[in-house]
Image (cartoon, rainbow, N blue to C red):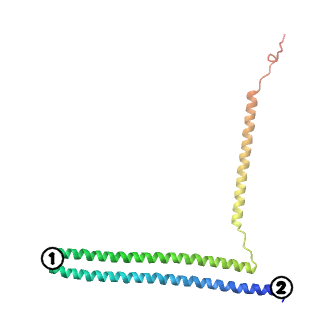
């Protein structure tokens, strides 16, 4: 068997593996979303069931307390109403907490599944491009932007250097003018007769 045939077989086999990986990644994302939504609905169902049980329990207890209260006194009735209200409040609070926890868990799981799916698709696409012999495109926007920034920085530096040179030349002229002594014949020791 020639090297070319072996290379073609290897490339074909790699392509099959890649296609299988892409299909599996898509199926895994769908399955994970199904599992996540199923878990969230089960959690919400359990919370509703628990709150229903607590509400039934509160109703039964309040009925018992109401019966006792009607036989004994109004003070017992007030306590019964308070206890039943407390049970009802606890049941409602538990249901709200369970629902909130279920929604948070479902949201977190959905975000993680989406991120993993996106990463898998990106990698699969890059692998497919590499196997097909396609190269990634150059980031032209980034290259052009960097070039424009370089031109702007060079222009600013050139203007700053020119301004500094002009300022230095002006200062040197001022120093020369200030330090220049007017030479007259008297200062040299010449006397006119």
Residue 92 shown left or right of residue 132 in the figure: left
Name which residue lies at 18% across and 81% down. Answer: 68
**Quarter occupied by the C terminus:** top right
Q: Residue furthest top?
A: 193
In which quadrant of the rendered view does residue 92 lie? bottom left
Which of marks 2 and 1 precedes in the sequence?
Answer: 2
The crowd level at tag 1 (other Cα within 10 Å; few <14, some 14-19, many 20+) is: few
Image spot of residue 173 (x, y percent)? 75, 33
Is label 1 in a helix, a strand or a loop? loop
Query: Which residue does the image show at 44% across and 84% down from the upper left?
Result: 42
Name the residue that disc number 2 marks. Answer: 3
Q: Position of residue 63 (x, y in %)?
A: 23, 82
How far across and how far down the image is residue 80, in percent? Answer: 22, 76
Name the residue beneath numbered marker 1. Answer: 73
Left or right for 26, reference 87: right
Q: Position of 188 compared to 65: left or right?
A: right
x 75%, y 37%: residue:
169
Look at the picture and state if 146 lies above or below 102: above
The residue positioned 79% from the left and 17% from the top of the image is 187
Q: Is residue 92 above or below residue 164?
A: below
**Figure quadrant of the N terminus:** bottom right
The disc at residue 81 is none
10 Å crowding of disc 2: few (<14), some (14-19), many (20+): few
């Amino acid at each position: 068997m020639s090297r070319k045939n072996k290379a073609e077989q290897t490339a074909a086999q790699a392509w099959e593996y890649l296609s299988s990986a892409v299909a599996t990644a898509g199926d895994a994302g769908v399955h994970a979303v199904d599992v996540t939504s199923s878990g969230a609905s089960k959690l919400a169902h359990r919370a509703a069931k628990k709150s229903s049980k607590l509400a039934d329990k509160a109703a039964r207890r309040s009925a018992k307390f109401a019966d006792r209260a009607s036989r004994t006194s109004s003070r017992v009735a007030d306590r019964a109403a308070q206890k039943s209200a407390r049970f009802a409040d606890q049941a409602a609070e538990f249901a709200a907490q369970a629902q909130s926890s279920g929604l948070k868990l479902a949201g977190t799981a959905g975000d993680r599944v989406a991120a993993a799916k996106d990463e898998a698709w990106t990698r699969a696409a890059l692998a497919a491009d590499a196997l097909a012999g396609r190269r990634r495109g150059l980031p032209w926007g980034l290259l052009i932007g960097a070039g424009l920034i370089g031109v702007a920085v060079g222009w600013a530096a050139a203007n700053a250097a020119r301004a500094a040179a002009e300022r230095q030349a002006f200062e040197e002229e001022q120093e020369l003018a200030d330090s220049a002594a007017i030479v007259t014949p008297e200062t040299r020791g010449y006397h006119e007769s």
